[in-house]
Image (spheres, rainbow, N blue to C red):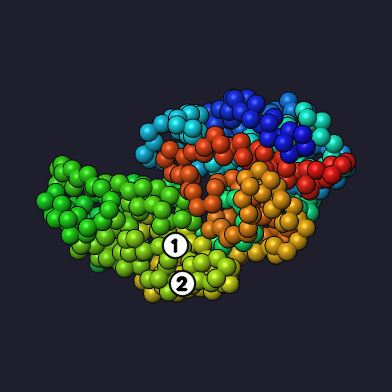
Amino acid sequence: MNYSEKINKYIDEHTEDMLRDLKGLMQINSAAEINADGLPFGKGSAKALEYIRQLAENIGMSTENFENYAVTADHGSGAPTLGILAHVDVVPQGEGWTKPCFDLTVENGKVYGRGAIDDKGPAVASLYAVKAIKELGIPLKNSVRYIFGGGEELGCEDIEYYCQKKQLPQCVITPDGEFPIVNAEKGMAHITAKKSFTEESAVNAKITCKGAVNAVPAKAQAALCGYSAGDVYKAIDTAKTSAEFTVSESGGVVEITSHGKSAHGSRPQLGVNALTALVKVLSILGIKECAVLSRLFPFEETDGASLGINFSDEVSGSTTLAFTVCEMTENGCEISLDCRFPVSRTVNEVVGGIEKALSANGYEITHKQTMEAHHVDENTPFIDALKRAYEKVTGEKASCVCETGVTYAHNMPQGVAFGAAPRGEDCNMHSADEYISIEQLKNVAKIYANAITEICKTEEDI
């Protein structure tokens, strides 16, 4: 039996152990918060980092905590040849869960819970790759370093901090995307803009939609004066959106809640945007500012066409744009957007287009977080090794693809996302009832173990 066959057999025999260890990590609410409780990303993130550090230490790896920004775990001696980057922070719970959010639930061959696919499940599964290598006594010539971050969902400051202290390995993979190999990632722009109302432009409506900027909102609420519930129901019928609405009236105030379906902000076409649905209804009611917002961000438009940024190319497809956050009062309106753009475009081109459209409608950009697009040449020994690892386990031909999300590998010269989701399967990432199949968890562990032996080299041919 060769190494690959031994690895596969080991993972199959230790699946329950892997699920047990994953359950402990998923029971930690590690939604990151900037500078909370005197920690860079809050108590939950720090607790999750300590959990994964202890798990790696129990496997027999040498570990180090980088001031609760990140934790490393090494196997082998000497400078690491391969870096594996994963994160243990998660996005907040959000709406619509039918199963416990911060726990592990197994149902019909799937593991449910926040972090199942992003990124706790893949993080634990990838650690089991080293556990298999160690316990099977597979000798490596070079070492591998895991880097677990605690603030990826807030902009990757965790890895930026680590890079101030240590140098990354030359080759880097992260199980935070899709299989087979993501060698291109779209550029990203998170934009916050604000508009103040004058006495003449003040509105008689309040809108509240607060959540993660990188998640399509599943719920948005408004409170209206000067309208009846009947008026609202007529507007809902006219809007003809796929969102659902609840309406109540009390003391001359009508409250309306829009219910949609969340999705990752980089894949808005997979969700039903409760905010754009609500804004459309309010625009039909004649609320002027909502007419502006509905024109800029039409319900079901996800390519930024109304802002003039619907770019596309052959490698990475088209722009995506999601209107995700809004707070409107009688004094003004603050909004946030998630935009992902093709590798052939620059931050300046895209943000410039957004700024032009917003400025023409009275909005001023107050905050922006951006990343240029990322593209790694697939014609390298590194990519070839990953292809072999994937093909050994799945029996399928490996290829390189473009991803809409931004991972730790972004802008690293030899950095790619390698799994963990099957190609084209969303797994409810950033949404309610997030999941990963048990079979896919096992595949991650097997593929990563084979990738480690391919890149770090064994003392005999495999």
- Which label sits on residue 101? none
Type of residue at label 2? Ile
Q: How far across and down, in percent of the image, does residue 241 sit?
A: 26, 56
Residue at 61%, 50% (x, y): give it.
396
Q: Secondary structure at mark 2?
A: loop
Type of residue at label 1? Leu
Residue 70 image-quadrant placement: top right
Q: Inspect this view and state whether residue 50 appears.
A: no
Q: How far across and down, in percent of the image, does residue 187 sit?
A: 57, 63
- Which label sits on residue 309? 2
Compared to residue 232, the image places residue 114 above or below, namely: above
Q: Are discs 1 and 2 less than 8 Å apart at CB?
A: yes
Q: Inspect this view and state whether residue 385 appears.
A: yes
| Left or right of 77 on screen, residue 267 | left
Residue at 24%, 47% (x, y): give it.
245
Q: Quadrant of the N terminus?
A: top right
Compared to residue 49, the image places residue 317 above or below, namely: below
| Left or right of 330 on screen, residue 270 | right
Residue at 34%, 60% (x, y): give it.
300
Residue at 78%, 37% (x, y): give it.
2
Residue 202 image-quadrant placement: bottom left
Q: Nearer the viewer, residue 209 or 332?
A: 209
Q: Which residue in the structure is indicated by mark 1?
A: 321
Q: Quadrant of the C terminus?
A: top right
| The residue positioned farthest toward the front in the image shown | 1
Q: How far across and down, in percent of the image, does residue 440 sit?
A: 57, 39
> Which numbered disc, 1 or 2, marks the residue that appears first in the sequence?
2
